[in-house]
Image (spheres, rainbow, N blue to C red):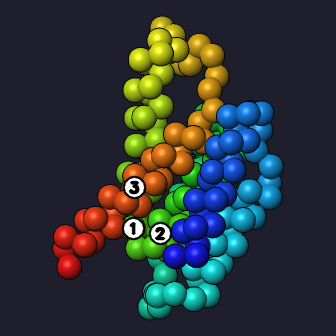
Amino acid sequence: MISLILAVISLGLASYEDFRTRMVSNYVWWIFSAGLLMMLSGGRKMDYPDIAGCILPVFIQEFIMSRAYGRADSHAFSCCAVFLNLAGFGLEGHILHMSLSLGLLTFVQILRRNIGRNLKLKVPVPFIPYIAAAFFFTVLSGYFVKLQIC
């Protein structure tokens, strides 16, 4: 629970900084990483942690997708992917999170008529608030699904 609170705080700070200055300080991701370390050191016991589920999304985000959007956005996706994996959502949780983030951004920018004919944004917008909103929805929907299964 503490790691989720740290994730919420760091995503909130990152969203604020991204919205205000279009730049996110590195300390935000250290706060998120501290939450991930707390999740690893305590809490539920994992017999075999899904290392590939943690490494694969981080590799894709940091080395491939960082060219499509900013480095801070890649860090946000990476941290969220590791959190979702350690929380038991797996690689599917990361794919859902990315899809929701991009879908939400696309929907809002279509409504604002900010998408050009080349399917790129006319005016750049902060992406981390969309990533944070999709993360919250992914976590909440995942917990509701788990409650219905049990």
* Crowd band around label 3 with a 10 angstrom C-alpha radius: few (<14), some (14–19), many (20+): many
Q: Earlier in the sequence, mark 3 or mark 1?
A: 1
Amino acid type shown at disc 3: Thr
For residue 89, the mark is: 1
Q: Is residue 52 visible?
A: no
Amino acid type shown at disc 1: Phe
Q: Position of residue 70 (x, y in %)?
A: 68, 37
Q: Tags 2 and 1 in contact by the CB under 8 Å rule?
A: yes
Q: Which residue is mark 3?
A: 138
For residue 111, the mark is: none
Mark 2 lies on a secondary structure that is: helix
Q: Quadrant of the C terminus?
A: bottom left
Snapshot quadrant of residue 143 = bottom left
Snapshot quadrant of residue 39 = bottom right
Whether 4 is drawn above or below 77: the answer is below
Q: Tags 3 and 1 in contact by the CB under 8 Å rule?
A: yes
Q: CA distance from mark 3 to mark 1?
A: 9 Å
Q: CA distance from mark 2 to mark 3?
A: 12 Å
Q: Position of residue 89 (x, y in %)?
A: 39, 67
Q: Residue at x 65, y 78 (%)?
A: 37
Mark 1 lies on a secondary structure that is: loop
Q: Is residue 141 visible?
A: yes
Q: CA distance from mark 2 to mark 1?
A: 5 Å
Mark 3 lies on a secondary structure that is: helix
Amino acid type shown at disc 2: Asn
Q: Which of pointers 2 and 3 indicates the residue nearer the eye?
A: 3
Q: Which residue is mark 2?
A: 85
Q: Nearer the viewer, residue 65 or 142?
A: 142
Q: Residue at x 33, y 63 (%)?
A: 142
Q: Which of pointers 3 and 1 indicates the residue nearer the eye?
A: 3
